[in-house]
Image: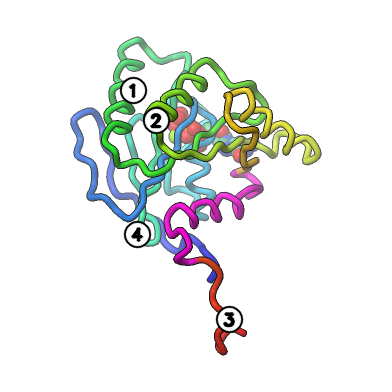
Amino acid sequence: MEFRIKKAEFVTSVGKDGKYPEKTRAEVAIVGKSNVGKSSLINSLCGMNKLAKTSQKPGKTRLINFFLLNGEFHLVDLPGYGYAAASKQEQAEWGSLIESYFASGRVGHIFMLVDIRHEPTQDDRQMFKYILYYAIPYTLVATKADKLAKSRRRQAANKCAKLLGAPPYAVAYSSETGDGKDELLERLRQIVYGDELAKAPDTDENA
Ligand SMILES: Nc1nc2c(ncn2[C@@H]2O[C@H](COP(=O)(O)OP(=O)(O)OP(=O)(O)O)[C@@H](O)[C@H]2O)c(=O)[nH]1
Ligand SMILES: [Mg+2]
């Protein structure tokens, strides 16, 4: 059985004193610096243009946005870090928002996004340490792969992971072209369903 996102709907936005929605069978959160393409990746994975709001201006997503996929699990869009225009107060608010979310124990897996063209920033390193500290399983995703020649993508994606101090592999992804989408959907399937929706058995029906 092929795994696809058949249905994706916005659930709720949660700010400082907000209440998280009821837990589902899995929760995958998307983190990364501002403008790296988190909201775009959600739209591209779900095959919907306007599910998560995107912008050329960093700092678009300010709240924790929960999306329910296939009626069964959460994909969570987080506000990005590290945009120059953020005030000290905004940075502090971001910190406490993310920290309480990570500490909630709800997050089953993190997709950490880095720009395939750039070395990880100090903020990226900090975020990665954070993920390790909370011992949350993660997948590294190098975004905007379409900005590099095909021949350079694999090496550049792996380099991003290596420079973070992670095992040297990242999914090379493009929300523009859909590159890496099948691979990331397969990761998602494993995370949410494990072996449950693995290969369909050879029954008479599908032999
Ligand atoms: N070429 C290219 N542009 C992309 C890709 N993904 C995102 N972008 C562009 O990058 C900009 C930021 O995308 P968003 O998805 O809003 O970024 P974000 O990480 O959600 O940003 P914040 O909400 O500010 O944290 C937009 O102009 C997108 O069109 C991609 O794969 N390729
Ligand atoms: Mg966003």
**Disc 2 vs disc 1: Cβ atoms closer than 8 Å?**
yes
Q: Earlier in the sequence, mark 1 or mark 4?
A: 4
Cα gap from disc 4 to disc 3, whole angstroms: 26 Å
Three-letter code for the amino acid on which mark 2 is drawn: Pro
Three-letter code for the amino acid on which mark 1 is drawn: Trp
Three-letter code for the amino acid on which mark 4 is drawn: Glu
Residue 195: image location, x then y, percent: 48, 62
| Ligand 2 rendered quadrant | top left
Q: Tell me the quarter of the picture where residue 203 sits.
A: bottom right
The image shows a total of numbered marks equal to 4
Q: Earlier in the sequence, mark 4 or mark 3?
A: 4
Cα gap from disc 1 to disc 3, whole angstroms: 50 Å
Which residue in the rendered view is the most extreme toward the right? 151
Q: Secondary structure at mark 3?
A: loop
Q: Secondary structure at mark 2?
A: loop
Magenta part of the protein: which range?
A: 175-197
Q: Secondary structure at mark 1?
A: helix
Give the residue pinned by disc 2: 79
Q: Which mark is residue 94?
A: 1
Which of the pair 188/176 is nearer the observer? 188
**Disc 1 vs disc 3: Cβ atoms closer than 8 Å?**
no
> How would you rate the neighbour count of disc 1 (Cα within 10 Å): few for under 14, some for 14-19, many for 20 or more?
many
**Disc 2 vs disc 4: Cβ atoms closer than 8 Å?**
no
Q: Is residue 32 left or right of residue 142?
A: left
Q: What is the quadrant of the C terminus in the image?
A: bottom right
Q: Nearer the viewer, mark 1 or mark 3?
A: 3
Give the residue pinned by disc 3: 202
Q: Is residue 10 above or below residue 170?
A: below
